[in-house]
Image: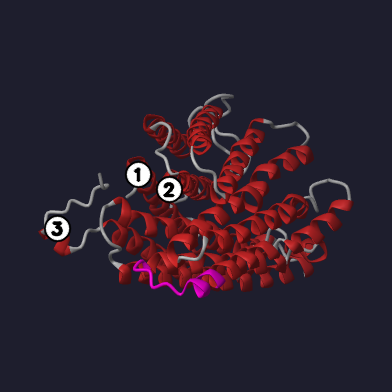
Amino acid sequence: MKYQTQKIAFAYFIVAMALFAVQVTVGLVLGWIYVDGNFLAELIPFNIARMLHTNSLVVWLLLGFFGAAYFLVPEESEREIHSEKLAYLQLLILVIGTAGVVVTYLFDIAQGNFLFGKEGREFIEQPKWVKAGIVVAALIFLYNISMTVLKGKKTAITNILLLGLWGIAILFLFSFYNPANLALDKMYWWYIVHLWVEGTWELVMASILAFLMLKLTGVDREVVEKWLYVLAALALFSGILGTGHHYFWIGTPGYWQWIGSIFSSLEVVPFFGMMAFAFVMVWKGRRDHPNKAALLWSLGCATLAFFGAGVWGFLHTLHGVNFYTHGTQITAAHGHLAFFGAYVALNLAIISYAMPILRGRDPYNQVLNMGSFWLMAGGMTFMTFTLTFAGTVQTHLQRVNGEGFMDVQDQLWIFYVMRFGTGIAVVLGAVLFIYAVLRPRKELIEAGVSGTPAE
């Protein structure tokens, strides 16, 4: 570890992995509820479990991004983080906010209360006091990272990373605006949900992936940075107007059907570019880096993101197709593989690379870590296929033949059983990953190595 303040990332990664475990466990519960609709109905209704699943996903991914920034910015800027205390204060605020959200959702406290009650807007249901806390934590983070970069060396990686992180924070402010008009509400709602994952998050993804390629392949920085700027430009060019594919059926003008279809089709390009970038860098570098697991996760991230976000997104992004498939299990298939490939695998890649360094030893448990990749990637890929088949059947029976929603759901039971099986593989892979990353090797224990962050 070159810089002492890089150890901040350790705390963020630990909390992120804890929430990752919660997220996949709740996801497995939701998978079984699709098979047995009355499972835990009294204890944790489906809508509450779904909120916990999606919210914990977003929070742990953001914590992973924050941890990645605290790890890579000192190396890129060639200076320590501006304030270590502020970094830990930010984490404390986020942990308190997360705990508040869980309690609010599970026990439905302060229902209808303006400040403390949950809101009814999907993915941004958090009470306003929690949202205010998130904004404060984001401001602390942006100040801390920006001051570090401004006082240190500037690189393409830190420039694109800061652009993405500032975009995430600014766009989240739209969560406080809830107009009475439902169509207008959805327009601004997609400013957060779409422009995060198909805009600013892509910039964060590209910058972290570029950092990993730089470290793992040994390719010249100039080559990596040229690729990075091109990928960032493509992501913004396609992603901003690509928001239009969410405007097809919410009451917006008809021209959005053409704008959304055209620019959404182009959203495949940056994800293909990231996949090509990762493999070309590995081919050019021809470097035998000891951390094979981090390299596997990096290549897996780029590949699965292309198929999940790019190919599966394109499958139903044209408005003529989306008219039938919108809101079916095809959407769920796309969402699961896209999030896993683009952002889950990315976070697990940077954790795989950084944790051995943070803990002061060489890469470890490579076989277990790589085994966790194949379990999770295989499980998520098969889950995507089962949901795609389920969505195809659902589209025909429900949207073409006009059968009732619940009648169709009964006929999809076999697909949901298979989906639950793939969920078991994903959970086992997640447990194996956490075990592989956190467990010290036996010989290190015998030598008296504690496995705590390196000083």
The residue beneath circle 3 is 445
Task: Using a 10 Å C-alpha cutoff, classify the residue at mark 3 as few (fewer than 14 neighbours), some (14 to 19) or many (20 or more).
Answer: few
Q: Quadrant of the C terminus?
A: top left
Q: Nearer the viewer, residue 380 or 374?
A: 374
Q: Is residue 342 left or right of residue 180?
A: left
Question: Going from the N terminus, do you reach mark 1 or mark 2 first?
Answer: 1
Q: Where does residue 169 sit, x and y in percent of width and height?
A: 59, 37
Task: Using a 10 Å C-alpha cutoff, classify the residue at mark 2 as few (fewer than 14 neighbours), some (14 to 19) or many (20 or more).
Answer: some
The residue beneath circle 2 is 75
User: Quadrant of residue 431 in the image?
Assistant: bottom left
Task: Find residue 3 and name its label.
Answer: 1
Instruction: Compute the Cα span from label 2 to label 3.
Output: 29 Å
Question: Going from the N terminus, do you reach mark 2 or mark 3 first?
Answer: 2
Q: Nearer the viewer, residue 227 or 267?
A: 227
Q: Where does residue 188 sit, x and y in percent of width and height?
A: 72, 39
Per the image, is 282 magenta? yes
Question: Going from the N terminus, do you reach mark 1 or mark 3 first?
Answer: 1
Q: Amino acid at mark 3?
A: Ile
Q: Amino acid at mark 1?
A: Tyr
Per the image, is 343 magenta? no
Query: Helix, strand, or loop for circle 2?
Result: helix
The magenta stretch is 280-291
Q: Amino acid at mark 2?
A: Glu
What is the tally of numbered marks visible in this picture?
Answer: 3
